[in-house]
């Protein structure tokens, strides 16, 4: 009796990297996102690469082929540009802290207490955003200016003679808090809106104090909104320039003023590019460090 021979097993070849990449590029999601991706590369990545290249060219040159040098980054520290970094990041951090203290109670009222009055209050907070930031800050300038200002003129009617509150770091901070408060407030409102009322009532029924409810229930659930508002405000505040111009009189140096000066009056694009890149890198590192210390998966209830 002849022995039966088994057919050799078919060899299944794994697709190569090229096939996988080609299949990924042909997927519906990638094809749908291609226009946005192209726009992102041309409108954002492209200019950023050009600025990065300029930061390594010799000072006061406009030729990317003039050679590579790190002298622009060295001048940032040897010519006291680092002071602008300290002021900008300090003011941004203080703006975030003050806006969180001011915005959380208002956000809690909008999401939990105001009821039918929440919409009018929200409208009052939104309407200033339709007016140019420069116009709003100039209004504060007219209000605080010495002698002919609204504040000084109003106090003179009561026999009180005051000096100017302009051109001080505290006034710049006040302007930044005023401008960036909505960017902190609205994400917190969304975060607090996610807090279930039954969980708060159950905690109260179990004997939790108001502070315990805030710490154990409301704060963890609302933390994603708080985090988004804080990071958004910080990134915007680091690049603030109008507040320092209108309310600070350029007495307090900030990063954005130095960048504008190098790109315009000084015509030193390489140094302006180096300051811009360093500001982006430092801001990115700080944001990443904050994000790594906060477990968003736990905060969002994914584990």
Image: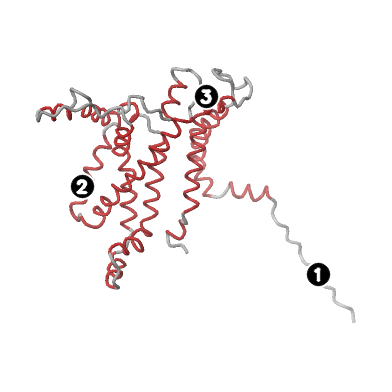
Q: CA distance from mark 2 to mark 1?
A: 79 Å
Count of numbered labels shown in the rendering:
3
Q: Is residue 146 placed above or below 41 in the rendered structure? A: above
Relative to 65, is 133 on the left or the right? left
Scheme by which the image is coloured: secondary structure
Determine which of the numbered discs, if any, sits on residue 87 in the image. Answer: none
Binning the other alpha carbons within 10 Å of mark 2 as few (below 14), some (14 to 19) or many (20 upward) gives: some
Q: Earlier in the sequence, mark 1 or mark 3?
A: 1
Residue found 30% across the figure and 62% down from its top? 211
Residue found 78% across the figure and 67% down from its top? 9
- Quadrant of the rendering where the N terminus is positioned: bottom right
Marks 2/1 in contact by CB < 8 Å: the verdict is no
Indicate the position of residue 283 as horizontal and vertical percent values: 47, 39
Q: Earlier in the sequence, mark 3 or mark 2?
A: 2
* Residue position for label 1: 7
* Residue position for label 2: 121
Marks 1/3 in contact by CB < 8 Å: the verdict is no
Q: Earlier in the sequence, mark 2 or mark 1?
A: 1
In this rendering, the label closer to the viewer, 2 or 1 = 2
Marks 3/2 in contact by CB < 8 Å: the verdict is no
Q: Is residue 284 placed above or below 217 in the rendered structure? A: above
Binning the other alpha carbons within 10 Å of mark 3 as few (below 14), some (14 to 19) or many (20 upward) gives: many
Indicate the position of residue 144 as horizontal and vertical percent values: 22, 29
Residue found 41% across the figure and 34% down from its top? 88
Indicate the position of residue 69 as horizontal and vertical percent values: 62, 25
In this rendering, the label closer to the viewer, 3 or 2 = 3
* Residue position for label 3: 271
């Amino acid at each position: 009796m002849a022995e039966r021979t088994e057919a050799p097993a078919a060899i299944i070849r794994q697709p190569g990297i090229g096939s996988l990449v080609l299949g990924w590029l042909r997927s519906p999601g990638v094809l749908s996102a291609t226009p946005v991706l192209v726009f992102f590369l041309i409108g954002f990545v492209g200019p950023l690469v050009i600025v990065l290249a300029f930061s390594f060219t010799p000072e006061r040159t406009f030729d990317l082929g003039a050679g590579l040098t790190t002298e622009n980054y060295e001048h940032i520290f040897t010519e006291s540009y680092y002071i602008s970094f300290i002021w900008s990041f300090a003011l941004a951090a203080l703006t975030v802290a003050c806006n969180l203290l001011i915005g959380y109670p208002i956000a809690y009222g909008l999401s939990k207490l105001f009821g039918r009055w929440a919409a009018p209050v929200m409208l009052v907070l939104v309407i200033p955003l339709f007016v140019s930031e420069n116009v709003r800050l100039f209004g504060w300038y007219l209000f605080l200016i010495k002698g002919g200002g609204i504040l000084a003129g109003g106090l003179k009617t009561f026999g009180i003679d005051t000096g100017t509150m302009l051109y001080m770091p505290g006034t710049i901070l006040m302007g930044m808090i005023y401008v960036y408060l909505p960017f902190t407030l609205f994400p917190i409102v969304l975060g607090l809106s996610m807090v279930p009322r039954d969980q708060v009532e159950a905690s109260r029924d179990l004997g939790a104090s108001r502070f315990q409810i805030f710490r154990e229930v409301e704060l963890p659930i609302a933390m994603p909104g708080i985090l988004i508002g804080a990071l958004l405000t910080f990134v915007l505040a680091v690049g603030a320039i109008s507040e320092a111009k209108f309310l600070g009189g350029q007495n307090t140096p900030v990063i954005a003023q130095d960048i504008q000066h190098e790109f315009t009056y000084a015509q030193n694009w390489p140094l302006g590019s180096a300051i811009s890149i360093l500001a982006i890198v430092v801001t990115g590192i700080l944001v990443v460090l904050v994000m790594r210390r906060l477990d968003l998966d736990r905060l969002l209830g994914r584990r």
